[in-house]
């Protein structure tokens, strides 16, 4: 659907279509009015129109004024008004909105932010400071967090639970900033409050992550076999964001979620965290690999993908290769990509497990071809092409 916020392709089509319409609509203005006013009028009408359309993710009303301008242009053209009047039809709704979003609104917001920061500095009321944690401007939230952090934690902790569970990341971040600053001075009292919140308070998941940053041992004690995967993920993320990060403790939590998370989003989040931070910490990489290698049973797609991200030898490649011939395309593709990644990382020298990898890939090739004759299934043909390429890259070492 056009103008969906997550569709970049739709935006591209809309912009290209609008540009074509503007060239067609404004060419008579440039030609009949002549320089310099013709080109200037065309730019004044065209530039805000395109800018409003491109800004639609941050200011969706831009998608209302663009069609309004096009409608006014169409009405002016239908009534045979002069080309410059037709151009003004585009200009009238688009230019005021462009000026509002680009200049007037930011100026007013900066003035409001300055006033808010001054109010924080002049006030001595933590409740008033806490209200500013939800301010739309980052500098105001930061000023409020700094002010709250100057007070004893017991005096402000009751004001932090609500912003810590806000749906707005900026608000949660401001509350977390206060808690981190307080934790530097009052570690025990802050950790106790976070533990209470994590075990049933209103800000459970964010509190669990912050507790893992502040006191990893206490946070890990809260993780039980009955703990939800989202709770494990919050603790793991906190362990990875602390300085220095605690990769060895986070690895088992991440692998548990990657392998058995209830939803694809959970497993994907765990995969992302593991892949992102493993590049920064060798201990995390080793711990993740050790946990993955000990796993039994059919893996998840994300588990296989993570093995490909981290795997280093023929044993890792062999584990992934076993799933390259499955009927499930997502699993087969992930497994094949994992073997390809490990082969690249080892420069096609998989060691003792290479012959077994080649055998597993060959069996997968035969299995897929039996199920899908050539030309019957495009995805199967693509998998087979990649399998043959991979086998060719591994075969010389095998025969050697």
Image (tube, helix red, strand yellow):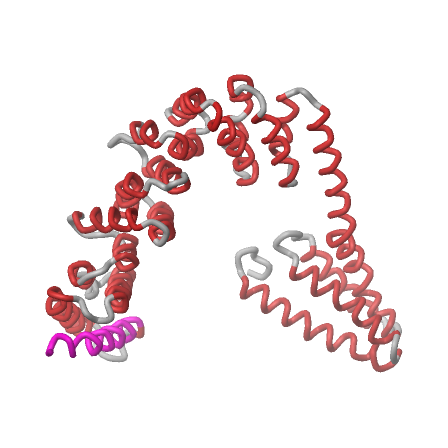
340 or 10: nearer the viewer: 340
Residue 253 against residue 332 in the figure, above or below: above
Residue 261 in sight in this render:
no
Residue 342 against residue 24 in the figure, above or below: above
Q: Which residue is located at x 70 percent, y 65 percent? A: 50
Q: Position of residue 335 (x, y in %)?
A: 24, 62
- Segment tinted magenta in the rendering: 379-400
Give the total number of marks visible in the rendering.
Answer: 0
> In which quadrant is the N terminus drawn?
bottom right
Q: Position of residue 213 (x, y in %)?
A: 40, 34
Taking the image as shown, residue 390 lies to the left or right of residue 153, namely: left
Residue reaching furthest to the top: 155
Q: Main secondary structure of the magenta part?
A: helix
Q: Position of residue 325 (x, y in %)?
A: 19, 66
Q: Is 258 inside the magenta-drawn segment? A: no
326 or 34: nearer the viewer: 34
Residue 159 in sight in this render:
yes
Residue 384 against residue 136 in the figure, above or below: below
Q: Which residue is located at x 73 percent, y 76 percent? A: 23
Q: Position of residue 141 (x, y in %)?
A: 62, 35
Q: Is 388 inside the magenta-drawn segment? A: yes
């Amino acid at each position: 659907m056009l103008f969906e916020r997550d569709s970049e392709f739709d935006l591209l089509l809309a912009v290209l279509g609008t540009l074509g319409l503007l060239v067609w609509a404004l060419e008579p203005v440039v030609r009949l009015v002549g320089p310099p006013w013709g080109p200037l009028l065309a730019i004044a009408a065209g530039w805000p129109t395109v800018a409003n359309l491109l800004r639609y993710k941050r200011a969706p009303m831009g998608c209302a004024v663009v069609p309004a301008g096009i409608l006014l242009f169409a009405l002016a053209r239908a009534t045979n008004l002069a080309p410059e009047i037709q151009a003004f039809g585009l200009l009238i709704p688009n230019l005021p909105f462009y000026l509002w979003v680009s200049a007037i609104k930011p100026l007013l917001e900066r003035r409001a932010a300055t006033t808010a920061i001054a109010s924080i500095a002049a006030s001595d009321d933590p409740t008033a400071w806490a209200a500013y944690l939800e301010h739309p401007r980052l500098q105001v939230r930061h000023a409020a967090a700094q002010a709250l952090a100057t007070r004893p934690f017991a005096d402000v902790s009751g004001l932090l639970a609500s912003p810590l569970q806000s749906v707005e990341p900026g608000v949660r971040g401001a509350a977390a900033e206060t808690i981190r600053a307080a934790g530097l001075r009052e570690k025990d009292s802050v950790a106790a409050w976070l533990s209470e919140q994590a075990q049933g308070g209103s800000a459970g998941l964010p509190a669990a992550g912050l507790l893992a940053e502040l006191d990893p041992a206490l946070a890990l004690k809260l993780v039980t076999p009955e703990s939800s995967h989202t709770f494990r993920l919050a603790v793991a993320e906190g362990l990875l964001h602390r300085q220095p990060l605690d990769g060895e403790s986070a690895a088992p939590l991440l692998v548990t979620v990657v392998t058995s998370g209830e939803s694809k989003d959970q497993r994907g989040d765990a995969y992302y965290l593991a892949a992102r931070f493993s590049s920064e910490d060798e201990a995390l990489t080793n711990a993740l690999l050790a946990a993955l290698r000990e796993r039994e049973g059919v893996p998840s797609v994300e588990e296989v993908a993570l093995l490909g991200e981290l795997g280093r030898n023929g044993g890792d490649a062999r584990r992934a290769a076993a799933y390259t011939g499955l009927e499930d395309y997502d699993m087969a593709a992930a497994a094949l990509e994992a073997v390809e990644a490990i082969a690249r990382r080892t420069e096609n020298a998989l060691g003792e497990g290479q012959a077994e990898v080649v055998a597993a890939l060959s069996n997968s090739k035969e299995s897929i071809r039996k199920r899908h004759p050539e030309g019957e299934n495009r995805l199967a043909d693509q998998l087979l092409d990649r399998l043959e390429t991979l086998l060719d890259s591994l075969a010389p070492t095998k025969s050697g």
